Image (cartoon, grey):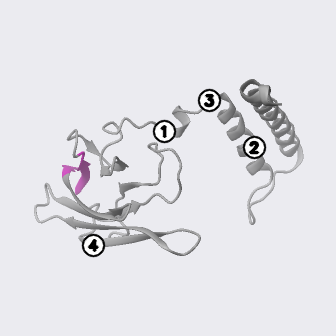
Amino acid sequence: MAHAIWRARSPIDGRNWSADSPSRIEQNYGHRDNKPLWGSRSQSTRVATGEETGSVGVTVNLADPDAGFVVVRFNLNGDPRVQEIQLESRPMRYGGRRYYFLCPKHGRRCEVLPMVGGVFASQQAGRLTYQSQSADQIDRMRDRAHRLEKRLWPDKGKPRPRGRNRERLVEAWSEADSAFENMFAATIMRRWGHLF
């Protein structure tokens, strides 16, 4: 039997929309039969206050195993919506079938459909990019310093680096952190220096 096959993710914060954004439906596959779970799944999104901000319900219909469809029921700004997304399947080399969403706008096969303008559609239809593609130099510097910091001081239960490896990481983190702080200060002065 397959595990949780269809996942729906709802936005819970006001970040810029990108292909990485949490508002999307994804298709995962089970361990044995590589086919989507029949029936319905639903998910609610809650914020820190505990109130429900949205819900997504997904129903899979595979009456025709070669081409089925998914019905997605969701709320967008309090407005209930229903969207039907066609599925296409392809035979796999060693048996079974692999299912894909068909983009409602372009008709192309895809495994992830982000929400674009209130409709689940392909990344290309929404002209979305990944956040890393839109990052500027200061974002990359901040991310590098953060990655090194996570390696130096990992979460509980993970071992800390020791010996020469730790010394190398401390040196790299120190350089990355000071480079980020210098770039950040220069950016602040360039943009808002006239206010000081």
From the viewer's perspective, is residue 6 above or below residue 105? below
Near mark 4 (Cα within 10 A), the count class, few <14, some 14-19 or many ≥20, is some
The residue singled out by tag 2 in the image is 148
The residue singled out by tag 1 in the image is 130
- Seen from the viewer's position, the closer of residues 36 and 195 is 195
Callout 3: helix, strand or loop? loop
The residue singled out by tag 4 in the image is 40
Amino acid type, residue under disc 4 in the picture = Ser
Give the spatial CA distance, label 2 vs label 3: 19 Å
The residue singled out by tag 3 in the image is 136
- Mark 1 or mark 2: which comes first in sequence? 1
Amino acid type, residue under disc 1 in the picture = Tyr
- Seen from the viewer's position, the closer of residues 98 and 81 is 81
Q: Nearer the viewer, mark 2 or mark 3?
A: 3
Could you tell me residue 187's position as x and y percent? 74, 28
Give the residues drawn in magenta, as a range: 88-103
Near mark 2 (Cα within 10 A), the count class, few <14, some 14-19 or many ≥20, is some
Amino acid type, residue under disc 2 in the picture = Leu
Residue 55 visible in the picture: yes
Q: Nearer the viewer, mark 2 or mark 4?
A: 4
Give the spatial CA distance, label 1 vs label 4: 30 Å
* Numbered badge on residue 48: none
Tell me whether the residue at label 1 lies in contact with that at label 4, contact meaning CB atoms closer than 8 angstroms: no
Q: Residue at x 75, y 56 (%)?
A: 154
Quarter of the rendering occupied by the N terminus: bottom left
From the viewer's perspective, is residue 172 above or below residue 73? above
Q: Which residue ends up furthest to the bottom in the rendered image?
A: 50
- Mark 2 or mark 4: which comes first in sequence? 4
- Mark 2 or mark 3: which comes first in sequence? 3
Q: Is residue 77 left or right of residue 12?
A: left
